[in-house]
Image: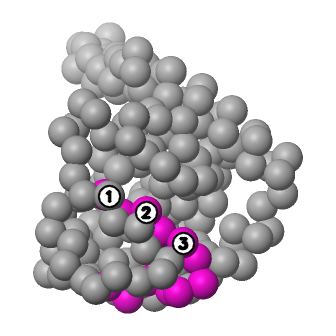
Amino acid sequence: ALRKHKAGYVYNLPSNVNFNLYGVGYDDSKKDNINYFGSYPADNLPFELFGSFGLVWDGSEAYTCAGNTGEYLKYNNPHKTSLYLSSGLPVIVWTEAAIADFVVKNKVGITVNSLFDLEEAISQVTKEEYVIMCQNAKGIAEKLRNGYYFYKALDKGISQLEPKES
């Protein structure tokens, strides 16, 4: 949802980067750097995403992930990450997000401290690096669609439940 109380950062986005917004509840006036596409059924959304990166951000502020929903990014793996990666899009995530290490290690996106760092961070990505991010995102997409991470977590969970020999 893009309502101000849930996603306040959307109403304070920097003007030097273009954004494509998807979801319900966006009620701001037209801005030159924001394209609002409305909402789509969950099964259709991956085929409707346009852009170079998927933004995984939450909370009340654009300068950092603040408030309860922003702080929660330190502990969870947001659906948005899986949505973008399963669509083959590299991601931009908050540096302090729990998923940030995965993004960097797997070279499927970049991290930023603030949305006001986006222009500089994106400009530092070379064409070659971006192609690699896209290829890696497609590899992760295949794993996501085939349940690789689910089964990996399930196997680990089951092995922890098995009795240990004494």
- Secondary structure at badge 1 equals loop
Of residues 39 and 157, the one drawn nearer to the viewer in this rendering? 39
The answer to whether residue 23 is above or below residue 42 is below
**Neighbour tally class for label 3: few under 14, some 14-19, many 20 plus, Cα within 10 Å:** some
Where residue 137 sits, quadrant-wise, is top right
User: Could you say where residue 122 lies in the image, as x and y percent from the top left?
Assistant: 69, 68
Label placed on residue 20: 2
- Secondary structure at badge 3 equals loop
Q: Considering only order in the chain, which callout, 1 or 3, is on the residue closer to the N terminus?
A: 3
Magenta residues (range): 11-22
User: Could you say where residue 132 lies in the image, as x and y percent from the top left?
Assistant: 76, 40
Mark yes or no: residue 70 visible: no
- Do labels 2 and 3 touch, CB within 8 Å? yes
Magenta run includes residue 54: no
Residue plotted at (60% across, 84% down): 16
Label placed on residue 18: 3
Q: Between marks 1 and 2, how big is the CA–CA gap?
A: 7 Å
Amino acid type at circle 2 is Asn
Q: In the displayed structure, does residue 102 sit left or right of residue 153?
A: right
Quadrant containing the N terminus in the rendered view: bottom left
User: Label 1, on which residue?
Assistant: 37
Magenta run includes residue 13: yes
Amino acid type at circle 3 is Asn
Amino acid type at circle 1 is Phe
**Neighbour tally class for label 2: few under 14, some 14-19, many 20 plus, Cα within 10 Å:** some
- Do labels 1 and 2 touch, CB within 8 Å? yes
Mark yes or no: residue 109 visible: yes
